[in-house]
Image (cartoon, rainbow, N blue to C red):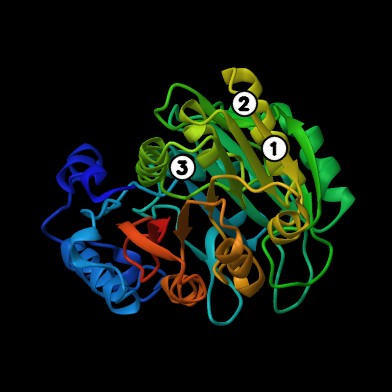
Amino acid sequence: MSPSRRLPASEPGDRTRLPLASDPPICHYFEAGRCRSCTLIETPAAQQLHDKEQRCRALLPGVPEQAWLPSVPGGVRDFRNKAKLVVGGRPGRVTLGILGPDGTGVDLRDCLIQQPAIRTAIPHLARFIEDTGLPPYDVPKRRGELKFVHVTVSPADELMLRFVVRSEQALEVLRNSLPRLRRAVPAATVVSVNLLPEHKAVLEGEHEELLLGSSLAMDTGAGFALHLRPQSFFQTNTEVARALYAQAAEWIGLAGPSSLWDLYCGVGGFALHCAGAVPSVLGVEISEEAVRSARRSAREAGIAARFEAGDATAFALGSDEVPEAVIVNPPRRGIGGQLAAWLEAADGITHVVYSSCNPESLATDLAAMPAFVVREARVFDMFPHTRHLEVAVLLERR
């Protein structure tokens, strides 16, 4: 991309900028010391975003100042589309929230960062759980049945409910109680049960059984929906995810490649948003569940993108083909030395869009790819009130 084709910094910022409140929201859970997950909630949102911008600039000193586009804020409340609720308490008096320092449940059903549809559903979920008689899992004593409820909301306010339980017996209780659950939470269009029999500090097990529906349709504002199956990953801030996808599609559209790989593609968000500007698009993702979601989304939208299940690095290193552009959206550890070396050496790759949730690993990976220069960069505040962030960069081969 030549300098003359650079996007004016004001354009994408004006289109995607979300409002910032001047004063921090008041969280009674934080003030009472019951929950400290939102460590920065008492810091004004504008200051939070400024600090994240400065952190990224310090970690990425090779990015020219003029390359930084206006950051995308994530809001101050009602922004989180997924609640991972620990089930605590006792039969007939359950808590839905987090675990306290002593391993007992702390009820957070009015958490202000959750989208309103989630907050509305939680009291009904609590009453439903109490009616089933399933005992909450007691972590210190290692007994009980119901461990977590994961609640995800779509832009249409439809819900996906996932119950994480210890035994097949609890699964059967929930299966038989499905009609009651649908009456209690009519917005639920997808319901599943996940089995986690082991005493582990994880949020879910490997086996998942669907009781209702198959996927939650996440409208990203691009004219089609991304289908989210129970074990598929999706960004927790829908509005910021929309801005992130739109920015990547804009960068790829201006680069104009004839072929594109989306590595670590998840449910296909980047690939599907960019497909209209690229003749050949391929997404690679290790989760077969996510690949099924991506294929369904492409099929229903009539988008000619292909998706394969596999390890991103192994796929790239083992392929005889090289695309003209690559999008990578790795986990916090980054893409690693092998994939970075492959991108560096693959002369046919002219552009890379790197979306990172960890600027430290991004800095390490960029240092391993000196053949590329950062043309544009942007901070996306996917996780307000925390130090976590998403930062995306457009790389062009020198």
Which disc, if any, is residue 126?
A: none
- Say which element carries label 1: strand
At horizontal 69% and vertical 49% (from top left) the residue drawn is 285
| Mark sitting earlier along the chain (1/2) | 2
- Residues 328 and 182: in front is 328
Quarter holding the C terminus is bottom left
Query: For this view, does 296 lie left or right of residue 171?
Result: left
Residue 378 seen in the current view: no
Disc 1 and disc 2 in contact, CB within 8 angstroms: yes
Q: Which residue is mark 3?
A: 118
Residue 396 seen in the current view: yes
At horizontal 62% and vertical 24% (from top left) the residue drawn is 304
Q: CA distance from mark 2 to mark 3?
A: 28 Å
Query: For this view, does 87 lie left or right of residue 112?
Result: right
Type of residue at label 1? Phe
Q: Which residue is mark 2?
A: 298
Count of number-bearing discs? 3
Vertical placement of residue 251 versus 372, above or below: above
Across and down, in percent, residue 20 comes to: 17, 52
Across and down, in percent, residue 287 comes to: 73, 49
At horizontal 39% and vertical 52% (from top left) the residue drawn is 110
Which class describes the residues within 10 Å of circle 3: few (<14), some (14-19), or many (20+)? many
Q: Which residue is mark 1?
A: 307
Type of residue at label 3? Ile
- Say which element carries label 2: helix
Q: CA distance from mark 3 to mark 1?
A: 31 Å
Type of residue at label 2? Ala
Quadrant in the rendering for residue 333: bottom right
| Mark sitting earlier along the chain (2/3) | 3
